[in-house]
Image (cartoon, rainbow, N blue to C red):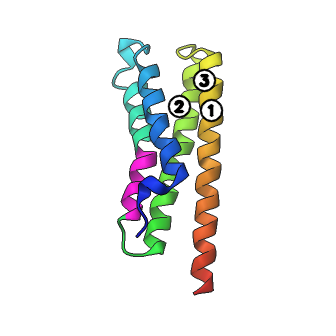
């Protein structure tokens, strides 16, 4: 199996974890067990599922974990959007994050498509 650290989408999502964690420090205390907890789980789930999928025996299993990672990216997209709309995250901080999340979602979709293509060739 390929080392997950070699995937650009893993590298990008790993970096995103640190960006998000810095931003979460400014969230109100009353959101620690709501938005903050949910955002942390969704953020960590993206690179974690890529890593776990790389450890699986088959490409089909890897794809399943990439779909989970993609679902978490979509969830994070919404959570950052709603945090911005609630004026917890300023729009000038939220917009670049949303762009980065969208890039990750596209990269995951491309990787899934590429791997599916190799499965149909076998």
Tell me, for residue 94, which label it has, or none: 3
| x and y, in percent, of residue 51 in the image | 39, 56
Q: Alpha-carbon distance for marks 3 and 1?
A: 6 Å
Pointers 3 and 2 in contact (CB under 8 A)?
no
Badges 2 and 1: C-beta atoms under 8 Å apart?
no
Mark 2 → mark 1, Cα distance in angstroms: 10 Å
Judged from this view, the residue extending furthest toward the front is: 6
Q: Are marks 3 and 1 in contact (CB under 8 Å)?
A: yes
Which one is nearer the viewer's eye here, 76 or 93? 93
Residue at 42% across / 57% down in the picture?
Answer: 4
Query: For mark 2, what is the residue?
Result: 79
Q: What's the mark number on residue 98?
A: 1
Query: Which mark sits nearer the N-terminus, 2 or 1?
Result: 2
Q: Earlier in the sequence, mark 3 or mark 2?
A: 2
Task: Find the distance from the CA under tag 3 to the CA under tag 2.
Answer: 10 Å
Q: Which residue is at 57% across, 13% downward?
A: 87
10 Å neighbourhood of mark 1: few (<14), some, or many (≥20)? some
Q: Which residues are magenta?
A: 45-54
Please tell me which residue is depicted at 41% across the width and 26% down the height of the picture.
21
Say what secondary structure mark 3 lies in: helix
């Amino acid at each position: 199996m390929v080392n997950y650290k070699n995937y650009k989408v893993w590298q990008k999502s790993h970096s995103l974890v640190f960006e998000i964690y810095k931003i979460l420090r400014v969230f109100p205390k009353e959101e620690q067990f709501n938005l903050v907890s949910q955002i942390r789980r969704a953020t960590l789930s993206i690179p974690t599922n890529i890593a776990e999928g790389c450890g699986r025996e088959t490409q089909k299993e890897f794809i399943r974990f990439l779909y989970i990672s993609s679902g978490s990216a979509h969830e994070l997209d919404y959570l950052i959007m709603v945090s911005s709309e609630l004026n917890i995250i300023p729009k000038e901080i939220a917009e670049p994050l949303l762009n980065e999340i969208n890039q990750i979602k596209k990269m995951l979709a491309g990787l899934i498509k590429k791997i599916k293509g190799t499965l149909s060739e076998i």
